[in-house]
Amino acid sequence: MTAGGAEHLKVRVLLAYALPAFVVALPTIPVYIHLPAFYGIEMGLGLAATGGLLLAARLFDTVSDPLIGALSDRFHFRGARRKPWIAVGAVIAGLGLFKVLNPPAGADGAYLLSWCVVLYAGWTMVAVPYMAWGAELSNDYDQRTRITSWREFMTLLGILGAGMLGALTAKLGWPEARSVGAVAWLAILIGAAVVPLLLFGVPDRPTRAPRQAPRAPFRSLLSNRPFLRLLAGWFLNGIANGIPAALFFIYLEYGLGAGPEIRPLFILAYFGAGVLSIPFWLWCSARFGKHHTWCAAMVVAALLFLTVPFIPAGAFAAFAVICVVTGMALGADLTLPPAIQADVVDYDQWRFGHRRAGLQFALWGMSTKFALAIAVGLALPALEVFGFDPATPTAQGISALVVIYAVAPAVIKLVAVAVIWRFPLTRERHAIIRRRLGRQWRFTEEAI
């Protein structure tokens, strides 16, 4: 099989490609949720100082995305385009992860900032080429959904694995610092086993492009309407997912009245449903098309969110049903849009003469980070503006919390559906583009 081939990928190749997603996702909860309190409170840096340092590291992370994406598109080493970046990035990320989650006594702000920058740099060197590589493993419309399904299945398993490890270590009585450090060791050990499988078991060859006059990469991307349309839908849906994520524990405590002993069960139901739903979305995509299936999932999630204001405090079973169904919609959010983006890469190559999967997925990653930042930046201040005070919660304040948590994301999701519903790259149009690209290759080779 050649890179970019349209034939049915073997299970062993899919498994070798997808397994590193488990490792990348495993430290997500410790790094994004535990790190602020860990350094701000346990290490004594202060929450405000820790937040500022993490923000600075995140700004570097955002800027580095398009740089790594463009470089991994342009340069290759001994016939490999994505592998060298992932091999080096995995080592850097592993070192940064160990240092960040296992700080020495007396670690200060400079320690946190420097090692977070190392960690994020390594993560970017892995994540951006890894996503682009998945788009290049096959040119087939449905095979790409199969590839992203395997990858995102492993991603959700990694998040679940971290949550289960945290619950196990808590039951064993481990302190939080030891529990977080265990995640780093586990990710490094599993990564040492599965990254070589990726590097030696999955094909990666430089993708040829028709010889056309180059254009400024960012300028021509601004003329790529399918790319901009998909990016807008993905960005809006990212905000819609980010708002309830930022307010989840606040809603559980003050809106639903769920105690700390039951809250992890809702998380398990949400991500567990996401894992189990992926084969269903794969089937729906093959039958109804990627973007229509994704839109259907967003509509279902929006409608379920609109029922949250009618759920009384203590109705845990009703909210568990919402977690299961919206968790299933998460499976579609993770699986289908990257597969659509892979088709947009083909359109970009046909229309502008460049194959820029790395750059496009880098901008994709940037939009994800901006969407999550905007979600937090809007949701938390809005609670205060509309009268919610956790110290003295009132009925009016709790109502505002519920509306911001559930109704605002539902409206934003429906706007995203309106953007995506008439997306132009259907299965039939993508097949036409692939045929035209094939004619371009034949013409180019005859000219040579």
Image (cartoon, helix red, strand yellow):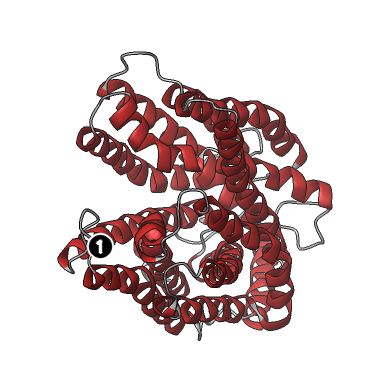
Q: Badge 1 local density, few (<14 within 10 Å), some, or many (20+)?
A: some
Image spot of residue 350 (x, y percent)? 56, 69
Q: Is residue 388 visible?
A: yes
Q: Residue at x 34, y 35 (%)?
A: 37
Residue 266 vs residue 240, the one in the foreground: 266
Query: Could you tell me the amino acid type at mark 1?
Result: Leu
Q: Residue furthest top?
A: 105
The residue that mark 1 highlights is: 378
Quadrant housing residue 116: top left
Is residue 91 at least partly visible in the picture?
no
Q: Quadrant of residue 55?
A: top left
Looking at the rendering, in which quadrant would you find the C terminus? bottom right
Q: Is 317 on the left or on the right of 254, as rendered?
A: right
280 vs 15, nearest the viewer = 280
Q: Nearer the viewer, residue 124 or 359?
A: 124
x, y (%) of residue 32? 42, 42
Percent x, y for residue 99?
44, 21
Q: What residue is at 56 percent from the left and 26 percent from the top?
A: 182
Q: Residue at image x 45%, y 60%?
A: 213
Q: Secondary structure at mark 1?
A: helix
Instruction: Estimate the x, y position of residue 176 in percent, counting from the top left.
Output: 46, 29
Q: Based on the displayed image, in which of its 4 quarters is residue 383 positioned?
A: bottom left
